[in-house]
Image: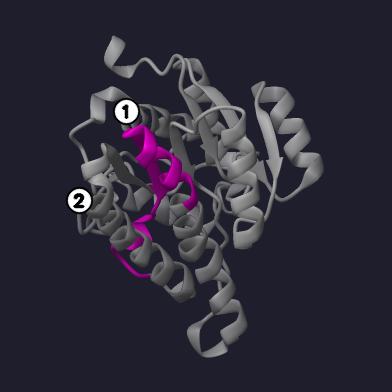
Amino acid sequence: MNLFDLSGKRALITGGTHGLGMAMAKGLREAGASLIINGHSEERLKNAAKELNADAYLFDVTDERQVRQAIEKIESNGPIDILINNAAIIKRTPALEMETSDFRAVIDVNLVAPFTVARNVAKHMIGRRAGKIINMCSMMSEVGRNTVSAYAAAKGGLKMLTKNLATEWAKFNIQVNAIGPGYFATEQTAPIRVDGHPFNEFIINRTPAGRWGDPADLVGTAVFLSSAASNFVNGQVIYVDGGILATIGKPLNEK
């Protein structure tokens, strides 16, 4: 369907060298988009660029000068039609034990950086009167959990930033939306996905779908929000979570 065709579009994915970022990059490429990926590890970026047949840019998303210079360089070679703000970090520390510097670091990467990157990209999109921006939110944009106060604060803020940027830039035909992943099977979650691990059992039992998400499960939503199919969708967070946020859970003795 032409509505979902991304041929001729150029997409920038921050943190696109692995995990969910790479999965979405592959999906956009299959839909016809040309890829530009960002990362902070030179070796990982080089390997991912080769695998994805993508242009690669090494820059720190929390450094506004680096962001501005990178965006200008990318734009000099062609427009950024799609931006996916995917770069993120998490520090699992109880609030009473968390250093303020660590709290700020999480906010900088997960909230300030998406604002900085989006603002620099949007300046060019406004001139073209077209653009798609996708922020990567989280279930922690809606609910809390022990040890992730900084992450939840950042992702909750990112949800509201998404709505506000959509409000300001809609008149320029720019759609700003977000994806809220649930719990996904990635290399980062591999140690807690083994049979018998308490958290693995918790997630499987807590998720109505009865499983962890596969990174490929994000592709359809990413393509939709990047394409003409979502031209009248703005300021929304689409949760791809297997139904977790739709339910209060099931009794412990229910199979």
In the image, 183 versus 15, the foreground residue is 15
Boundaries of the magenta span: 120-144
Q: Is residue 241 above or below residue 10?
A: below
The label number, if any, that marks residue 246 in the structure image: 2
Which type of secondary structure does the marked residue at label 1 adopt? helix
Mark sitting earlier along the chain (1/2): 1
The label number, if any, that marks residue 90 in the structure image: none
Left or right of 95? Residue 209 is: left
Q: How many labels does the image show?
A: 2
**Kind of residue indicated by mark 1:** Phe
Q: In which quarter of the image is the C terminus?
A: top left
Residue 222 in the image: x percent, y percent?
A: 39, 33
Left or right of 6? Residue 209 is: left
Q: Can residue 230 be seen in this view?
A: yes
Q: What residue is shown with label 1?
A: 224
Decide whether residue 129 is among the magenta residues.
yes
In the image, 129 versus 44, the foreground residue is 129
Q: Which residue is drawn at 27% across and 16% down?
A: 3
Q: Residue at x 57, y 86 (%)?
A: 100
Q: In which quarter of the image is the N terminus?
A: top left
Residue 123 in the image: x percent, y percent?
A: 43, 47
Decide whether residue 174 is among the magenta residues.
no
Label 1, label 2: how many angstroms apart (C-alpha)? 22 Å
